[in-house]
Image (tube, rainbow, N blue to C red):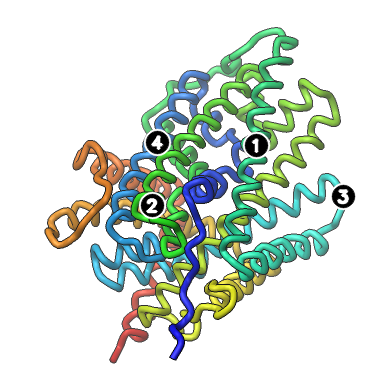
């Protein structure tokens, strides 16, 4: 009797690092750094917040790296929360992912892709939705055909977007001497920046770094995952932090702070200033390239969580099947594409995603607490231990909870509604898990 099909190990360190970098760098760094700049009216303050966001992301990545060195099973955060606190919490993470956090971000990025395609070739509302759905279906089909194809595509587009970042930075500094003054602060009188402003800015920065944890979803398809994933997390978050700092520095080198603060397409404004009208079109192509690459990684990773949940009996068993030829979680890939496409077609992803996305930071805080709980288990073997334990995990917990509290204070109705959506998964879990 032949063995049942298994996931294929094909993701090495370069591909895993590309997955980290590619899922983090989407459109936000090219489009809207104004979320931080509008709150903190000083160039040095803004750059300091980006450094802090990068440092906290790195701490979160290192927390995840230790957990990945203990548990080599696919599923990432779902597995870590289940091992630390039990199946109900792991199920809530998967529930939130499926209905909003992961499916919603796929829909949102696909819509951004279609909007920038519309800048180059006018599409109209219906055609834009069709393009967004088409790109979801295309990337799902590529990942359906094999993780090797999906990870190679991700690596190619990650390399391309890093080349684009370097080109923007080099051109910005090379041609930026044309402007009259550099690193110009705000010309508008401001009240003193409060601690709440810095927390809000930090929250915006941390959201721009979102996606760093997704490489852990595909552990069973990673070569030597206990060593590869920790290295990929450290390398990837370091590369992104340097890229974000370089991009923000060149923005302020060329554009005054007030213009950056009010821009919704800051990279295009930079290009227009230096290269004239066609510069904005060039940036639209860069954003298209970047969003496609980010979407490729996010489409690849999500189905591995649903596969793990199905294998644990927390989703329909048929979702846990692996394709005998392609060695991929084919049914989970199809279902994810279907849900994300419905969210695009109906536009419902906007309300769901904005309400629920902040809740992932509750789970991240619990994941770091879970690491401290798992340290007490002598039976667990780890290939990597986070430096600075327990101080760094505790700093991460506090920062994650600050993000959550900031979101609740700023938008109490929206965020509490989102928390209710997540908690609605609890009765579903107990009904599903009932003997």
Mark 1 and mark 3: Cα distance apart in space: 20 Å
Disc on the earlier residue, 1 or 2: 1
Q: What element carries label 1?
A: helix
Residue 121 bears which disc, if any? 3
In the image, residue 10 sits, relative to residue 244, either above or below, namely below
Q: Are the residues tagged 2 and 3 within 8 Å (C-beta)?
A: no
Disc on the earlier residue, 4 or 2: 4
Mark 3 is surrounded, within 10 Å at the Cα level, by few (under 14), some (14 to 19) or many (20 or more) other residues, namely few
Q: Does residue 384 show up?
A: yes
Q: Is mark 2 on a helix, strand or loop?
A: helix
Instruction: Identify which residue, 23 or 260, lies in the foreground.
Output: 23
Mark 4 is surrounded, within 10 Å at the Cα level, by few (under 14), some (14 to 19) or many (20 or more) other residues, namely many
Residue 421 location, x and y as percent?
A: 44, 68
Residue marked by disc 1: 30
Residue 365 location, x and y as percent?
A: 31, 51
Disc on the earlier residue, 4 or 1: 1
Residue marked by disc 2: 361
Instruction: Identify which residue, 254 or 231, lies in the foreground.
Output: 231
Q: Which residue is drawn at 36% across and 85% down?
A: 432
Residue 4 location, x and y as percent?
A: 45, 83
């Amino acid at each position: 009797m032949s063995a049942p099909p298994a996931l294929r190990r094909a993701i090495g360190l370069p591909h895993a690092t590309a997955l980290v970098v590619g899922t983090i760098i989407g459109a936000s760094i090219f489009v809207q750094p104004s979320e931080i700049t509008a709150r903190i009216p000083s160039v040095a303050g803004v750059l300091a917040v980006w450094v802090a966001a990068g440092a906290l992301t790195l701490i979160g990545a290192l927390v995840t790296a230790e957990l990945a060195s203990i548990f080599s099973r696919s599923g990432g955060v779902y597995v870590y929360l289940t091992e630390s606190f039990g199946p109900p919490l792991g199920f809530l993470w998967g529930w939130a992912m499926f209905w909003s956090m992961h499916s919603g971000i796929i829909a949102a990025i696909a819509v951004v892709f279609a909007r920038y395609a519309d800048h180059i070739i006018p599409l109209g509302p219906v055609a834009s939705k069709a393009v967004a759905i088409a790109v979801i279906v295309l990337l799902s089909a590529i990942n359906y055909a094999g993780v090797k194809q999906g990870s190679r595509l991700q690596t190619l587009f990650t390399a391309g977007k890093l080349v684009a970042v370097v080109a923007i930075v080099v051109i910005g500094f090379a041609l930026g001497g044309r402007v009259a003054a550099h690193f110009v602060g705000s010309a508008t009188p401001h009240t003193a920046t409060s601690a709440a402003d810095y927390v809000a800015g930090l929250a915006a920065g941390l959201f721009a770094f979102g996606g760093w944890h997704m490489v852990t979803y595909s552990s069973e398809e990673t070569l030597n995952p206990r060593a590869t994933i920790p290295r990929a997390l450290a390398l990837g978050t370091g590369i992104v932090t340097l890229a974000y700092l370089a991009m923000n520095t060149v923005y302020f080198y060329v554009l005054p702070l007030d213009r950056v603060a009010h821009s919704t397409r800051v990279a295009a404004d930079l290009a227009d200033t230096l290269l004239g009208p066609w510069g904005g079109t060039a940036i639209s192509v860069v954003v298209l390239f970047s969003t496609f690459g980010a979407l490729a990684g996010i489409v690849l990773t999500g189905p591995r969580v649903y596969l793990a949940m199905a294998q644990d009996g927390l989703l329909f068993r048929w979702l846990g099947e692996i394709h005998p030829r392609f060695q991929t979680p084919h049914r989970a890939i199809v279902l994810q594409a279907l849900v994300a496409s419905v969210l695009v077609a109906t536009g419902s992803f906007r309300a769901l995603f904005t309400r629920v996305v902040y809740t992932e930071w509750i789970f991240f805080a619990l994941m770091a607490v879970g690491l401290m709980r798992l340290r007490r288990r002598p039976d667990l073997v780890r290939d990597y231990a986070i430096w600075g334990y327990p101080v760094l995990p505790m700093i991460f917990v506090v920062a994650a909870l600050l993000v959550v509290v900031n979101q609740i204070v700023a938008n109490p109705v929206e965020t509490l509604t989102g928390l209710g959506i997540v908690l609605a998964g609890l009765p579903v879990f107990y009904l599903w898990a009932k003997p």
